[in-house]
Amino acid sequence: MPDTTLPPMLVLGGGPDAEREVSLMSSKGVAEALKAAGHEVHYHVIDRLDAAGLKALPGRVVFPVLHGGWGEGGALQELLEADGRPFVGCKAAAARLAMDKMGTKLAAATLGIPTAAAAIVNPTDVGLPFSAPAVLKPVHEGSSVGLHVCKDQSRLEAAREAVKADIAAHPSRVYMVERGIMGGRELTVAVLDGEPLDIVEIRPAEGVYDYQAKYFRKDTQYVTQPELPGDPTTSATIRGHAKALFRGMGCRHLARVDFILGTDGVGYLLEANTMPGFTGQSLVPKAAAHAGISYGRLCEMLVGFALRDGA
């Protein structure tokens, strides 16, 4: 049964970030699910907002379904905190930390969570601190935007040139290089109100789990509660690390924590997403469904968490 006590909601989508298209799909899904459950929903597509623009939008609780640096990485959360209405997701400080992949890796290391060595890319340098296999990716983007997985040195050199060109076109974009863990298994853990759900393994049909595989291709397989080497200890450890990172970084309400399981049987932290996708192919709704929580009920629960915790 729907929670009829929920007040009118403001669902936001869009934003100015590279993941705008995904945000539009996610936010539309959330708004439609809440409406279908009988709630009053005001859905607005935005670019950037200022305080006055946010204040003018209706709704007593805000569900900001935006992905990327501005919408998920602290700037919007700062506006929401100042606005004073309860809102779904992290506060600004935790959102900024989680959006910074290097900051997240440092937090993980402090908590004793394994993570691959990494460094910031200097675009004026003629080389990189790591040789192949290695991964190049932006520090402050999600959805695999700008991701380069380089299994050999020639691909790494080509990726470095592509990264230099991308930085020249987007001067504010910062890249990192990470030691590649080849042959690993991609795993993700949804954390709901501080508690980890079952692991989901991502099995792309071919190549890398990139932007197209995440949101548009239909041949990616998702296996919930997969059997891992060393289970049940391995699965329990990875879920425990997701929970510890969520709490250690000060997250709230929800997050998705990504790992790669190396051939050595160790789950290495990749990153954390504080407003993960809510499309039909997204991983948090899949994990929730496995736990018996429907998409619509998940959205209601998140609004309930926001009302409980306030702005």
Image (cartoon, rainbow, N blue to C red):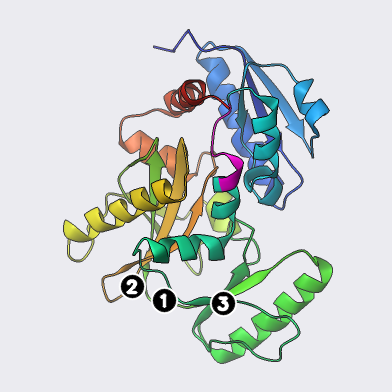
Residue at numbered disc 1: 181
Tell me the element at label 2: loop
Q: How far, Cα to Cα, is label 2 from label 1?
A: 6 Å
Type of amino acid at the residue the image marks with label 3: Ala
Q: Is residue 223 magenta?
A: no
Q: Which of marks 2 and 3 is nearer the N terminus?
A: 3
The reply to whether residue 100 is in sight is: yes
Question: Which residue lies most toward the top here?
Answer: 4
Q: How far, Cα to Cα, is label 3 from label 1?
A: 15 Å
**Which of the numbered marks, if any, corresponds to residue 262?**
2
Tag nearer the camera, 3 or 1: 3
Which is more toward the observer, 297 or 92?
A: 92
Label 2 close to label 1 by CB (< 8 Å)? yes
Q: How crowded is mark 2: few (under 14 residues within 10 Å), some or many (20 or more)?
A: some
Which is more toward the observer, 210 or 85?
A: 85
How many circles with numbers are drawn on the protein?
Answer: 3
Q: Which of marks 3 and 1 is nearer the N terminus?
A: 3
Q: Residue at x 46, y 60 (%)?
A: 107
Type of amino acid at the residue the image marks with label 1: Ile
Q: Is residue 3 above or below residue 246?
A: above
Task: Identify the image quadrant of residue 259.
Answer: bottom left
**Which of the numbered marks, if any, corresponds to residue 119?**
3
Q: In x, y percent, where is residue 213?
A: 54, 57
**Which of the numbered marks, if any, corresponds to residue 169?**
none
The reply to whether residue 150 is in sight is: no
Task: Please give the range of residues in magenta.
Answer: 87-93
Q: How crowded is mark 3: few (under 14 residues within 10 Å), some or many (20 or more)?
A: some
